[in-house]
């Protein structure tokens, strides 16, 4: 059986936290917008992070999620956590059931 389209169609956050690009250096500016499962994800720029909920589509420009409980935020900036690209992300189409 082959699907005509990916469902879900985006990579998704597996934890509440902050989405950002793993290649970015910190600290990262936290943008004011938030991403929820039912919202259309924005695109973030280099050096930015965005608050994200579990199950929410990953914003453009982001490839990693730092869990909320592991995040260090000071004055609207996220200290750059030591995470590899893809941390806390369900990458499409890696979740496959046979």
Image (cartoon, rainbow, N blue to C red):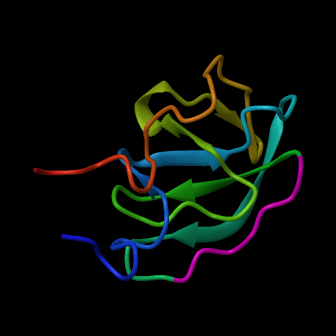
In this rendered view, identify the residue nearer to me: 96 or 29.
96
Q: Farthest front residue?
A: 1
Query: Which of 93 and 87 lies nearest the eye of the viewer?
Result: 93
**Residue 83 picture quarter:** top right
**Would residue 77 appear left or right of 88 to someone viewing this image?**
right
Q: Name the image quarter holding residue 88.
A: top left
Residue 29, given in percent of the width and then of the height, sits at 82, 48
Q: Is the magenta stretch mostly helix, strand or loop?
A: loop
Q: Which residue is painted at 43% across and 52% down in the image?
A: 13
Residue 89, image x, y percentages: 45, 44
Left or right, 8 with reference to 85: left
Residue 85 x, y percent position in the rendering: 63, 31
Q: How many marks?
A: 0
Residue at horizontal 36 percent and vertical 44 percent from the top: 15
Specify the segment rendered in magenta. Answer: 40-46
Decide: is 56 above or below 5: above
- Which residue of the protein is positioned furthest toward the top in this rendering? 82
Residue ID at (75%, 48%) = 76
Residue sitting at x 44%, y 73%: 9
Residue 55 % position (x, y): 34, 61
């Amino acid at each position: 059986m082959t699907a005509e389209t990916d469902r879900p169609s985006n990579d998704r956050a597996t934890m509440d936290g902050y989405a950002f690009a793993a290649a970015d250096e910190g600290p990262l500016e936290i943008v004011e917008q938030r991403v929820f499962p039912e919202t259309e994800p924005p695109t973030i720029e280099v050096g930015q992070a965005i608050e994200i909920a579990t199950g929410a589509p990953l914003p453009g420009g982001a490839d990693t999620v730092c869990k909320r409980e592991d995040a260090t935020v000071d004055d609207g900036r996220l200290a750059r956590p030591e995470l590899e690209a893809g941390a806390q992300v369900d990458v499409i189409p890696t979740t496959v059931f046979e």
